[in-house]
Amino acid sequence: MRVFDLHCDTIDTLTYANQGFFSEFVKPGQTGDLVHNGIQLAADRMPCPWCQCYAVWIPDDLSSFGMTALEFYRGARDWFMRHTSPDGPVTQVRDARDVLPTLEAGKVAALLTIENGIHLEHLELIDEVAQDGVKMVTLTWNAANAIAHGSAAHGGLTSYGREAMRALEDRRIVIDVSHLNDESFWDVARAARRPFAASHSNSRSVCGHPRNLTDDQFRAIVDGGGIVGINYFRGFVSNRVKGFDAPADGEVTFDELAAHVEHFLDLGGEGAIALGSDFDGSETPEWLDACEKVAPFRDRIAARFGEDLAERMFFGNAHEFFVRNETA
């Protein structure tokens, strides 16, 4: 068993545990580092060789933090750099071709990503994040920024956003369309010159949340050679969920999550589906609320869809996608 997970919010939750709204949700004793902590994702509890995309999520509203988006990014980036090293248990991977050697050395392979390009208001800042080793950028969160419009906003990709896309692609930084509204999604799909990702988005046909992908959007990603990470957040899995908590009529089930996998397979997505857990950034079902529970989850996926699909979904598709991004 190997895991390649396209999205988590562990960096923010640990970096800013005592600041802003994080202080309301992170309980005493849960803080720590990437190896030892009491939240959902910790290297010492990962049950197998593990490659993790660690996102710096930049909230649309930073008023409770008293800092700019760029300051927020740099603070979280610096924390990540201090807690990864070539000699430590968690190693930053700047080239996806180094994922397998890192795993074979018994280390967690850590890819730095960004969720919300709100701070990338000038092209030189794209040079900065490229130098930081960022491998993927979710263009927006829920609101609009200088690049595009999120799922709670109206509008498409901006003229600067087209320049920013080209700059990111030229630096082999993957464009991530999770959180975009439909108009921005299709603008990105038309403008993209390289395969792109939806790092943590499910099927809108199965669960009608606007953060999920329509069938046509999923097909566009697949046809372009892209990747889609299955999100564990209850509210993106089941129409029964109206907030963050489990619905009153029972916990979100494996069958409800598996329905997204099945629907994507029906659309020809066997080479495109991956994991996009959203660990440490969302409320996931109790049976999938920590990294050590991913192993039994994989067993159930293999029993339902076969071992080959389980290997593709849990590691192979994402690994091959990022290696292609380095070499194509």
Image: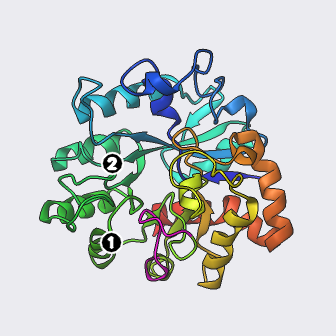
* Residue in the picture at 44% in, 83% down: 216
**Residue positioned 82% across, 66% down in the render:** 302
Local secondary structure at mark 2: loop
Q: Residue at x 78, y 64 (%)?
A: 301
Q: Is residue 33 magenta?
A: no
Q: CA distance from mark 1 to mark 2?
A: 16 Å
Res. 323 in view: no
Classify residue 67 by image quadrant: top left
Which quarter of the rendered picture does the C terminus lie within? bottom left
Going by the numbered disc 2, the residue's amino acid type is Asn
- Whether 245 is drawn above or below 83: the answer is below
Query: The residue tagged with tag 1: helix, strand or loop?
Result: helix
Ranked by sequence position, the earlier of labels 1 and 2 is 2
Compared with residue 316, is residue 84 higher up or lower down, i.e. above or below?
A: above
- Image: magenta residue range: 207-217
What amino acid type should be assigned to the residue bearing mark 1?
Asp
Q: Taking 258 as reference, is 302 left or right?
A: right
The residue nearer to you, when weighing 273 against 283, is: 283
- Discs 1/2, front: 1
- The quadrant holding residue 71 is top left
Where is residue 125? Give x, y as percent: 22, 43
- Residue on which the image places disc 2: 116
* Residue 150, image x, y percentages: 30, 58
Q: Which residue is mark 1?
A: 182
In front of the other: 230 or 249 = 249
